[in-house]
Image (cartoon, helix red, strand yellow):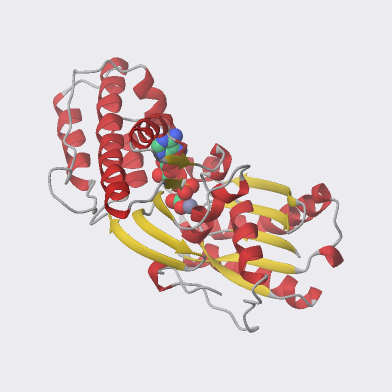
């Protein structure tokens, strides 16, 4: 089975082709970062319009790169949620229409399921069951992953997602968006020890997270200083330490609680180098191993949707012609195909 995957949930247009026998054949991404830069955040209507402009040419380019004709595609997968309603509708409408025209099945994929399964695209992949840490711009979630579609949440953020905290910190430090890579780059020039921020909810039992207090602490510190380049770097450094430490403490606790020996880290914040180092240290100390997608598959991409689609479609999980998108969608409501 050969699946075309389409991702349009936010500000990246991602397309890929995954082949059951040969693996990933091609993938391409068009980022809208420059388009939204002037507005300090993603403008939903501009995002939808850009997906409309870019999606079909991107699909043609990916098919050409994969060396396949439309008749070689035997299934279509698209992100059906969660995300921006208009942006989701572009991918869903194009994906469904192509599947109808080509006479092949189509399936709507949960965006976070895509992220979660992305490490399985790498050599020496993790095997079910495992512990997963999903860290993106919209989600911070620890879950016990028993099998495809069997996801049991263990803890999540009660307020801001950790990626959102990176983005907001970048904004108030005058750094560019998306904030994660910008804060990480500034932090590399920061001096340890000048600032120290709280590690929210690490002193309490449980696996939930909270990042709004950390954000407020950063805001308070930033307001008290003249924000010269060194101060920005020092604050970024302290923020990154606090955010990463908080995630690492909870991951270690979840490994102990579940007894899992595999920790899968997915979502945009999974690209963070310090997080990778800290998690590796803590996991190794417990005899566990950490799995990541390659950095380009940590952030939004079409490959993860093509792969999740292939997993579901090979179980004959195609859906009827009508379609809906779900801007809000609890991952724990997913079922095995
Ligand atoms: O998974 P993703 O691409 O989109 C969502 O589904 O939200 O994640 C985007 C988030 C943004 O908040 C971005 O700032 C963050 O991931 N991010 C990072 C890094 N690269 C991206 N955060 C920390 N360090 C990074 N290197
Ligand atoms: Zn994402």
Residue at horizontal 64 percent and vertical 77 percent from the top: 318
User: Quick check: 335 above or below 8?
Assistant: below
Q: Is residue 178 visible?
A: no
Q: Position of residue 31 (x, y in %)?
A: 58, 45
Q: Is residue 226 visible?
A: yes
Which picture quadrant has residue 156? bottom left
Which picture quadrant has residue 51? bottom right
Say which of 233 and 65 sits in front.
65
Residue at horizontal 19 percent and vertical 38 percent from the top: 199
Left or right placement of residue 188 versus residue 80 in this view: left
Q: Position of residue 257 (x, y in %)?
A: 27, 52
Q: Where's the C terminus, which quadrant?
A: bottom right
Say which of 195 and 271 sits in front.
271
Which picture quadrant has residue 8? bottom right
Q: Position of residue 219 (x, y in %)?
A: 19, 36
- Ligand 1 quadrant? top left
Residue at horizontal 63 percent and vertical 58 percent from the top: 307
Left or right placement of residue 89 versus residue 264 in this view: right
Q: Where's the N terminus, which quadrant?
A: bottom right
Left or right placement of residue 221 versus residue 245 in this view: left
Q: Position of residue 192 (x, y in %)?
A: 25, 17
Residue at horizontal 64 percent and vertical 46 percent from the top: 29
Say which of 183 and 3 sits in front.
3
């Amino acid at each position: 089975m050969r699946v075309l995957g389409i991702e349009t949930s936010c500000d990246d247009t991602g397309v890929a082709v995954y082949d059951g026998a040969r693996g990933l054949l091609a993938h391409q991404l068009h980022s809208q970062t420059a388009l939204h830069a002037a507005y300090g955040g993603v403008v939903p209507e501009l995002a939808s319009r850009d997906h409309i402009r870019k999606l079909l040419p991107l699909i043609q380019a990916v098919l050409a790169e994969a060396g396949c004709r439309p008749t070689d595609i035997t299934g279509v997968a698209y992100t059906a949620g969660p995300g921006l309603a208009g942006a989701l509708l572009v991918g869903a409408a194009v994906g469904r229409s192509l599947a109808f025209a080509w006479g092949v099945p189509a399936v709507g994929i949960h965006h976070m399921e895509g992220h979660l399964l992305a490490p399985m695209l790498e050599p020496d992949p993790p095997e079910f069951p495992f512990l997963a840490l999903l860290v993106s711009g919209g989600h911070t979630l620890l879950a016990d992953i028993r099998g495809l579609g069997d996801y049991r949440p263990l803890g999540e953020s009660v307020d801001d997602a950790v990626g959102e905290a990176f983005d907001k910190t970048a904004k108030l430090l005058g750094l560019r968006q998306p904030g994660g890579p910008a804060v990480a780059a500034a932090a590399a020039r920061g001096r340890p020890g000048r600032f120290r921020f709280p590690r929210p909810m690490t002193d309490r039992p449980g696996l939930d997270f909270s990042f709004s207090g950390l954000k407020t602490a950063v805001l308070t510190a930033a307001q008290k200083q003249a924000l010269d380049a060194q101060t920005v770097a020092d604050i970024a450094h302290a923020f990154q330490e606090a955010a990463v430490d908080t995630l690492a403490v909870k991951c270690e606790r979840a490994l102990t609680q579940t007894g899992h020996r595999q920790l899968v880290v997915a979502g945009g914040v999974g690209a963070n180098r310090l997080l990778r180092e800290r998690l590796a240290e803590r996991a190794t100390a417990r005899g566990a191993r950490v799995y990541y997608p390659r950095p380009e598959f940590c952030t939004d991409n079409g490959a993860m949707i093509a792969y999740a689609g292939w997993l579901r479609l090979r179980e004959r999980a195609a859906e009827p012609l009508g379609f809906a998108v779900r801007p809000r969608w609890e991952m724990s409501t997913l079922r095995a195909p």
